[in-house]
Image: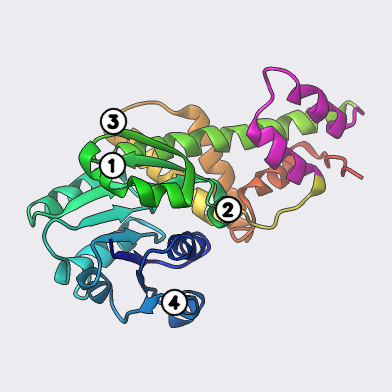
Amino acid sequence: MRVGFIGLGIMGQPMALNILNAGYPVTVHARRPAMMSPLSNAGATACNTSAEVAANSDIIFVCVSDTCDVEQVILGDDGILKGIKENSVVVDMSTISPSATRSLAKTLSSHNIHMLDAPVSGGEQGAIDGALSIMVGGDEEVFNRVLPLFKVMGKNIVHVGGNGAGQVAKACNQVVIGQAIAAIGEAYILASASGVDPAKVREALLGGFAGSRALESHGQRMLDRNFKPGFKASLHHKDMRIVMEAAHELGVALPGASMVTQYLNAVIGNGKGENDSISILELQEQLSGITVNKND
């Protein structure tokens, strides 16, 4: 099984390395040639175009930033569609619009090419550790064909449904995480304003129904004021735009998601888009005139 990987950023590079280290032959392409060096140094074949990757692969993974980037990689002048063979599989691990995903899957199907949408959660460390949560949309038989590769990159792998279902699941994930971050920030502000140590509050909450991985991980980083990006605010902002566009298309009300989107708008406006999305805490502090006690 020959594997292609297009998009070697903060997530794609470790994911591709894990596939290579598992013994699969890997062909790669990235817009910036320097990003291919760690892969080519480890034994992967570097290509000049996405079409060239597709021509030399049976399964092609794509991990880029946004809907327009995926469309360019697949349908562009030097895109996957220019080099791919029939019955190959395109696996999009980016986070993009569910409706655009369905359209791309339909286009590829007309050329007898399969597509899975398989966005991930778990951040850079999850990608490095091969411990990502992978949410997959597409045909179940095709999913089973790609499953051994998914298992190299992730631990929690769920076939959610047909094309686009993986992207819907990822949108739901971002809604939950965004509101969890905002809720933790509000809890810490309430504790600090009351003269109570938010670190002790967190410790107490972890033992009850309020306990969560978000409180465990993000909550600690918020106390440490560690805003180094595990997941950039600018990317979470992009994901929430996708959420709100989907809500608009479906005519559903998502007021909590809207609040998170506005927080992230302000994070971007304050020039903090390269920080982690837990930077929402700093905005909440400004609104209340409260600085959350640093955990010493």
Marks 3 and 4, the one that precedes in the sequence? 4
Q: Quadrant of residue 222?
A: top right
Are discs 3 and 4 less than 8 Å apart at CB?
no
- Can you identify the residue that label 2 sits on? 129
Q: Is residue 277 above or below residue 41?
A: above
Q: Give the residue at mark 3.
A: 250
* Residue annotated with mark 4: 43
Amino acid type at image mark 2: Asp
Task: Report how far apart the C-alphas of labels 1 and 4 lie in the structure.
Answer: 27 Å
x%, y% of residue 105? 19, 49
* Front position among marks 1 and 3: 1
Q: Are marks 1 and 4 in contact (CB under 8 Å)?
A: no
Q: Which residues are magenta?
A: 195-223
Q: CA distance from mark 1 to mark 3?
A: 30 Å
Q: What is the three-letter code of the residue carrying label 1?
A: Asn
- Helix, strand or loop at label 1? It is helix
